[in-house]
Image (spheres, rainbow, N blue to C red):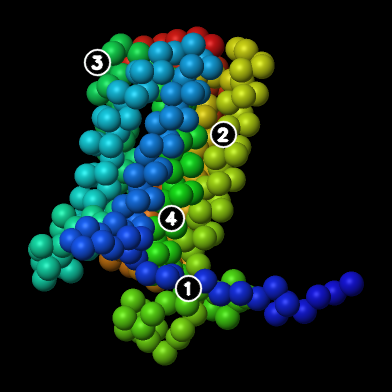
Amino acid sequence: MRFPLGLFAFQFQSPGAELLHWGPLTIRWYGFLIATAVLLGVSLSQYLAKLRNINPDLLGDLGIWLVIGAIPCARLYYVLFQWQDYLRHPEDIIAIWKGGIAIHGAIIGGTIATILFAKWHKISVWQLSDLVVPSLALGQTIGRWGNFFNSEAFGSPTELPWKLFIPRINRPVEYLQYNYFHPTFLYESLWNLMVFAILLYLFFWGLKHTNTLKVGTLSLIYLLSYSLGRFWIEGLRTDSLMLGPLRIAQIVSLVLFSIGFLGLLQIYIFKRSLPDITYSEQ
């Protein structure tokens, strides 16, 4: 039996960026979702650490380092590539609650924080990273909905059944005549949910099959799988950070995909350990 496509048609439309407004207090969806992602992510990483016989408090401490390293770097990364806009409104540079953070900036900042933390505690940076990346994928799944509530990070115009309505004030000048756009926030949220499920499955598979899942595997699979989806989705977006004619996110995705692919070749084909702070065998 064939069903007409329109039978399943629906459209997304943000109810607004504010979750709660009470007197001088305003809570925005964007900030609420980031805070929720951080709390869930830390809790999940601590749970996974316990299953690996690693002190969960260590992951709680790392969570603080990651927040300090990742969120400012994510904002700085975004601001640097949108510098001309922020020159006109410098007061918005610190207005992170309005949106405008870049996951690749967060990955850079989080990686630096993890390396420093690993050196300080003399523990394998890849072992720590393997405990964090499932939480990172989960956090991205949740955080992308902040773009929905802010009516940002959407794709090109479309009339697909799952189209996203964007208010005129949020549309690029060249697309003012269009009402509906690709919900790229949803595409990436669903992709990240799939990445999260794969990482979690592999984690528990590794617990049952000891000495088969090498240290660093989950981190490398995250880099490879997330970058694959981001490269495709970024091509649909209308607000990409650009370096001349090139989309920065696609360039970085190619680099991270290559790191993930080459890293997996190194540990499984060439049987060599990854560069690390310390080396721990599983």
Mark 3 lies on residue: 120
Q: Amino acid at mark 1?
A: Gln
Under tag 4, what secondary structure? helix
Q: Nearer the viewer, residue 105 or 101?
A: 101
Q: Earlier in the sequence, mark 1 or mark 4?
A: 1
Under tag 3, what secondary structure? helix
Under tag 2, what secondary structure? helix
Alpha carbon separation for disc pair 3 and 4: 32 Å
**Residue 174 location (% of width, % of height):** 35, 84
Mark 2 lies on residue: 199
Query: Closer to the observer: label 2 or label 4?
Result: 4
Mark 1 lies on residue: 13
Residue drawn 52% across the image and 60% down it? 186
Q: Which mark is drawn over residue 144? A: 4
Q: Amino acid at mark 2?
A: Leu
Asked if the residue at tag 2 contacts the one at tag 3, i.e. Cβ–Cβ closer than 8 Å, the answer is no
